[in-house]
Image (cartoon, rainbow, N blue to C red):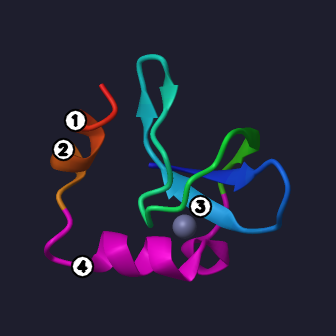
Amino acid sequence: MIYLQQKSGQQLHLVYEIENGFTQPICGFKVSGYRMTINVPMGHACKRCTKRINSSKFNPNEFIKKFL
Ligand SMILES: [Zn+2]
């Protein structure tokens, strides 16, 4: 998992790296592009992203599959 910042905005969303780039943020937020790739402590990431990734219902493989 990596953290990406939206092109315009301060929010750090959590995404996964895939073959052709990255998935959309796991919180469901739609972004058109990312400014940079940064690794920062979880505490700085989007609250909805962190909530989702900490949920026992979240399945990373299922999520990634949607973008392949
Ligand atoms: Zn998010």
The alpha-carbon separation of the residues under discs 2 and 4 comes to 14 Å
In the image, is 51 to the left or to the right of 5?
left
Task: From the top left corner, tell me how far across and down residue 36 is, in percent.
Answer: 77, 41
Which of disc 3 and disc 2 is earlier in sequence? 3
**Can you tell which mark lies on residue 45?**
none
Q: Amino acid at mark 4?
A: Ser
- Residue highlighted by disc 1: 65
Which range is magenta?
A: 40-58
**Which residue shows up at 44% across the image and 49% down it?**
1
**Which residue shows up at 42% across the image and 59% down it?**
26
Closest to the observer, 22 or 32:
32
- Residue highlighted by disc 3: 13
In the image, is 56 to the left or to the right of 10?
left
**Which residue shows up at 49% across the image and 49% down it?**
15
* Rendering quarter of residue 53: bottom left
Q: Amino acid at mark 1?
A: Lys
Does the stretch in magenta take in 51?
A: yes
